[in-house]
Amino acid sequence: MMSLATIQDMNLDRVKEARENDKRPMEISEAEFRTDLSTVQEGGNPSIIRHIPNLGDPDLIIDILPEYELVESLFVDKGGLGLWDSGGPALSIGGFIEKGLELTKEHGTLHWMLGSEGQFQIYIFALRKLVD
């Protein structure tokens, strides 16, 4: 099991890497969420979550993301053992995809980033781009 200090150091490393490499949140459309939802419903592995960049602690990265506004933060089980039932307070992978689809229907295409990662769960942040 990771210590709190280890988790904090990992998140600080992600922030540093994001700043050095000018990383930005990933745009995901409603169609992409629909495709992943179908894949999971058919027993396959989702692909979206593997490509979302981890930018670290959002409180520390927000200064380099002034063109984004937080829409919602989602607490997600990253173990992947239960695609539909995480068995706890975190969303399962399937639950994240369903919520992502719901949010994109409501807000249009959103931008996504991973952050505040622990050993078993991770926060995934939905952001709206304010300017192009």
Image (spheres, rainbow, N blue to C red):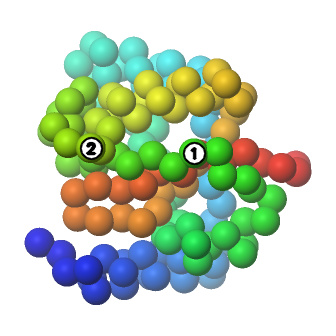
The reply to whether the C-beta atoms of the residues labelled 2 and 1 are less than 8 Å apart is no
Element at label 2: loop
Q: Which residue is mark 2?
A: 89
| Residue 89 in which image quadrant | top left
| Left or right relative to 72: residue 130 | right
Q: Type of residue at label 1? A: Glu
Q: Is residue 31 left or right of residue 94?
A: right
The answer to whether residue 41 is left or right of residue 57 is: left
Q: Residues within 10 Å of mark 2 (few under 14, many from 20)?
A: few
Judging depth in this view, the residue of 50 and 80 nearest the camera is 80
Residue 29 placed where, x, y %?
63, 30
Q: Residue at x 49, y 70 (%)?
A: 56
The span from disc 2 to disc 1 (Cα, nearest Å) is: 16 Å
Where 56 sits versus 27, above or below?
Answer: below
- Mark 1, other Cα within 10 Å: few <14 / some 14–19 / many ≥20: few
Residue 55 position, x and y percent, is 53, 66
**Furthest residue toward front:** 89
In this rendering, does residue 21 appear at all? no
The residue at 20%/42% (across/down) is 88
Say which element carries label 1.
strand
Residue shown at 36% from the left, 64% from the top: 117
Can residue 62 be seen here? The reply is: yes
Disc 2 marks a residue whose amino acid type is: Pro
Tell me which label, 2 or 1, sits earlier in the chain.
1
Q: Which residue is mark 1?
A: 72
Q: In this picture, is 14 found above or below 43? A: below
The residue positioned 29% from the left and 65% from the top of the image is 118
In the current view of this chain or complex, which residue is farthest to the right? Answer: 131
Task: Provide residue 78's location: percent of width, then percent of height.
Answer: 27, 49
Quadrant location of the N terminus in the rendered image: bottom left
The circle on residue 43 is none
